């Protein structure tokens, strides 16, 4: 009984048009509405629809399913390019430092070696080049043809030994980033 009175009390406090519009069981079985009721009904339906759209928009804005996948799809390629770029630059610096070390050691060995030296062999250009190739660690496809040796050339190094090297550095990930860079190094060791 008490529940019935609460409903009745609630209906008494509602606007009259709301009770008539929404109490109908089915629009086809009810009595036709007047022009004023139709405009109020469409206004009420528009407001309800607009409110539902706002709620749906807010719900969609709060819905975060798939956000991690979208963020990963954006971040992973950038991260991979950054990682491979750091590896590529590191390998390029390794090649430069190793080439510098090889020409310095070969020039020193050629300048201070005796004709019967066991370290460098004779100080002929061919033996100095082969010693330089042995000193260059970690450089792929490096041969004696990459080195040039000058002995007793006053214009280049005076009476000492000058060793130069030139190497075509290609990208480690050449399928992704196809480029080539010439790295060179020169060292002079006076006698």
Image: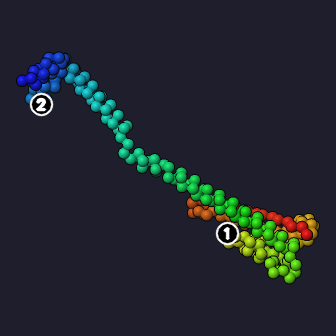
The local secondary structure at tag 1 comes to: loop
Of the two numbered discs 1 and 2 on the same chain, state the one appearing first in sequence. Answer: 2
> Which residue is at 36% across, 38% downward?
62
Q: Position of residue 97 (x, y in %)?
A: 73, 63
The local secondary structure at tag 2 comes to: loop
Determine which residue is flagged by label 2: 26
Tell me, for residue 138, which label it has, or none: 1
Quarter of the image that includes the N terminus: top left
Q: Position of residue 14 (x, y in %)?
A: 18, 18
Residue 88 vs 140, above or below: the answer is above
Q: Position of residue 127 (x, y in %)?
A: 80, 78
> Which residue is at 54% across, 55% downward?
80
Q: How many marks?
A: 2
* Viewer-closest of 113 and 91: 113
How dense is the environment of label 1, judged by Cα within 10 Å: few (below 14), some, or many (20 and up)? few
> Which residue is at 32% across, 31% downward?
54
Quarter of the figure with residue 85:
bottom right
């Amino acid at each position: 009984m008490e529940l019935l009175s609460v409903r009745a009390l609630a209906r008494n406090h509602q606007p009259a048009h709301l009770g008539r519009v929404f109490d109908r069981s089915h629009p086809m079985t009810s009595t036709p509405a007047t022009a004023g009721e139709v405009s109020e009904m469409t206004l009420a339906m528009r407001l309800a629809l607009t409110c539902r759209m706002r709620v749906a928009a807010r719900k969609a804005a709060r819905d975060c399913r798939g956000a991690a996948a979208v963020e990963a799809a954006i971040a992973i390629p950038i991260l991979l390019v950054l990682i491979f770029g750091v590896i590529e630059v590191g390998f390029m610096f390794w090649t430069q430092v190793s080439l510098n070390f090889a020409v310095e050691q070969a020039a020193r060995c050629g300048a201070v070696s005796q004709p019967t030296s066991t370290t460098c062999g004779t100080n002929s250009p061919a033996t100095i080049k082969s010693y330089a190739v042995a000193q260059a660690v970690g450089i792929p496809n490096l041969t004696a043809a990459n080195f040039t040796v000058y002995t007793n050339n006053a214009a280049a190094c005076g009476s000492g030994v000058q060793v130069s090297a030139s190497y075509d550095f290609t990208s480690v990930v050449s399928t992704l980033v196809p480029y080539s860079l010439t790295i060179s190094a020169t060292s002079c060791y006076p006698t």
